[in-house]
Every structure is written in structure tokens, then in C-alpha cells.
Image (cartoon, grey):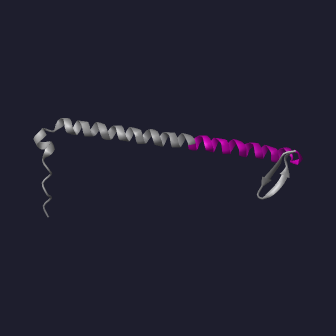
Amino acid sequence: MPIIKINGLAYELDTLGEESKGHLRYLAFVDSELERLMMRADMLKLARDEVGRRLDRALLRETVAGLSPDTALKPAPPAES
């Protein structure tokens, strides 16, 4: 008989009532869905980071392409106080 621990107490799974077993099945489902969603969120964060890097590169290319060599090499004038 499988033994499970709940809140620090050991229970023989076969001795639990159907209601308790149903709650255990539901908890197992919720836990697996949470894990799946966390993995998906991690994947989306990675994808977002990559798209952000691509945007940065595209903006840099557009900026460089729109500047003449003279302008691209000149430092910005100091801000007036």
C-alpha cells in the first residue's frame, strides 16, 4: 500500500475515503498545471528577451543607416546648465 504524507502525517492511500482521494487527484492536477504554466511563462520570457534584442539591433541599424559618417562620429554637444 502506498503511503503519502500530508501536513507531516503519514496515510495509507488505500485507506482514504473517495472524497479525500478526489481532493488528492485535484491537487495533483493543479500542481501539474501550475508547473506547465510556469514553464510556459519562462519560455515566453525568453522569447520576449530575444525579440527585444532583435529590436535593439534593428533600431541600431536604422540609426546608423540614417546618419552620415560625419554625424555618426561627432560627439553630442554638452548640455547647457
Answer with left or right where residue 42 lies relative to residue 49.
right
Magenta stretch contains residue 21: yes
**Where does the C terminus fall, quadrant-wise?**
bottom left
As rendered, which of 30 and 47 lies closer to the eye? 47
Identify the residue at horizontal 15%, vertical 43% (top origin). Answer: 72
The quadrant of the image that shows the N terminus is top right
Q: Nearer the viewer, residue 69 or 7?
A: 69
| Quadrant of the image occupied by residue 70 | top left
Q: Is residue 29 left or right of residue 9?
A: left
x%, y% of residue 64? 20, 38
Position of residue 45 measured from the top left corner of the image (x, y, whole percent): 47, 43
Most common SS among magenta residues: helix
Q: Quadrant of residue 10?
A: bottom right
- Residue farthest toward the left in the current orientation of the protein: 70
Residue shown at 15%/58% (left/top)? Answer: 79
Between 65 and 30, the residue placed more toward the observer is 65
Residue segment shown in magenta: 14-38
Residue 19 magenta: yes
Q: Residue at x 84, y 52 (%)?
A: 11
Image quadrant in which you'd find residue 14: top right
- Residue 36 image point, x, y percent: 60, 40
Left or right of residue 17, residue 44 in this image: left
The residue at 49%/40% (across/down) is 44
